[in-house]
Image (spheres, rainbow, N blue to C red):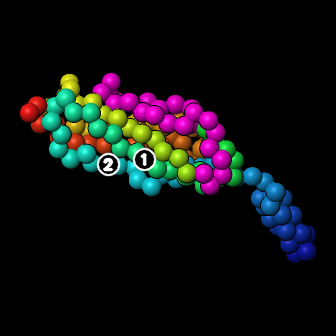
Amino acid sequence: MKQLTVLILAFVTFAFRQSPCEKISPEMHLEELKFNFGFLHQGEITFHDFMFTNTGDEPLIIQQADVSCKCTTVDYPKSPIKKSQKETIRVTFDSKTTIGRQERTVLLKSNALNSPVTLTFKCVVLKAK
């Protein structure tokens, strides 16, 4: 009976083990998720580049970038990002319609294991010069 239990346990262990040939899905590793622009004057346009790497084994495809406000635009790679490839996501903020403390988000949807990813930036918009 003990031998049968050991045999079943060994079978289950090997049956559910990940195959060394099995590929790992893409994963988006960002160097930072938040950025502070500091103080801006109303009407200024500024941007920040969020750097990332595909740390998975399959190509990473960013399918969509949703912004929390029309004052924010996003430029991201439209073609697949290969394994270990570094790329940039440029987030641009136009302060012409805002004043005071601002915090905005960008929601990135992709085929990565860690999708969706949220990028956040903040700033304080002062009256125009």
Tell me if mark 2 has few (under 14), some (14-19) or many (20+) residues whose alpha carbon lies within 10 angstroms of its own. Answer: some
**Is 100 included in the stretch rendered in magenta?**
no
Residue 16 appears in the picture as rendered: no
Residue 49 appears in the picture as rendered: yes
Q: Which residue is mark 2?
A: 35
Tell me the element at label 2. strand
Magenta stretch: give its range. 62-85
Amino acid type for the residue under numbered disc 2: Phe
Amino acid type for the residue under numbered disc 1: Phe
Q: Residue at x 11, y 31 (%)?
A: 128
Q: In the image, residue 68 lies at what x, y percent?
A: 35, 30
Residue that sits furthest to the bottom in the current view: 2
Tell me if mark 1 has few (under 14), some (14-19) or many (20+) residues whose alpha carbon lies within 10 angstroms of its own. Answer: some
Q: Which residue is mark 1?
A: 50
Q: Is residue 88 left or right of residue 94?
A: right
Give the quarter of the image for residue 124. top left
- Placement of 127 over or under 9, stated as above or below: above
Q: In the image, residue 75 lies at what x, y percent?
A: 46, 34
Q: Is residue 117 left or right of residue 60?
A: left
Which of 37 and 13 lies nearest the eye of the viewer? Answer: 37
Q: Are marks 1 and 2 in contact (CB under 8 Å)?
A: yes
